[in-house]
Amino acid sequence: MTVYELCERDVVNVTTGQNLGKVDDISFEPETASITGVILYGRLKLFGLLGREEDTAIPWGDIEKIGTDVLLVRTAVSAPPRSRKKLFGVK
């Protein structure tokens, strides 16, 4: 598996069923070249003009299973709730 293939996968929390997002980067220890975790970038604010939310780091030990299209994790980290605004205020 390559880093590119890993970055195509969604990350789903097993305990809550919440989709945390896609893997954007990995963190590793340079001395041993071992992966220490995956990083999910925060969501963009106003198309990136106002920066982005905080990144989410998930330790490698929290990853339960790497599937063909999803990473299953068991972690206390949760994605910030998305606020969806309805067009013209109609719900």
Image (spheres, rainbow, N blue to C red):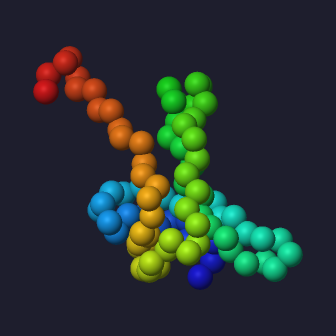
Q: Residue furthest top?
A: 88
Position of 70 with respect to 17 (left or right) is right
Spot occupied by residue 36 in the image (x, y as percentages of width and height)? 67, 70
Residue 71 appears in the figure: yes
At a point 61% along the width and 30% down the height, the residue shown is 51
At a point 73% along the width and 78% down the height, the residue shown is 34
Foreground of the two, 57 or 40: 57
At a point 36% along the width and 57% down the height, the residue shown is 19
Identify whether 76 is placed above or below 64: above
Foreground of the two, 56 or 61: 61
Image quadrant of residue 29?
bottom right
Position of 36 with respect to 33 (left or right) is left
Spot occupied by residue 30 in the image (x, y as percentages of width and height)? 83, 71
Q: Quadrant of the C terminus?
A: top left
Foreground of the two, 86 or 77: 77
Position of 46 with respect to 60 (left or right) is left
Residue 5 appears in the figure: no
Image quadrant of residue 50?
top right
Position of 24 with respect to 64 (left or right) is right
Spot occupied by residue 38 in the image (x, y as percentages of width and height)? 59, 64
Image quadrant of residue 11?
bottom left
Q: Quadrant of the N terminus?
A: bottom right
Identify whether 74 is placed above or below 80: below
Q: Residue furthest front?
A: 76
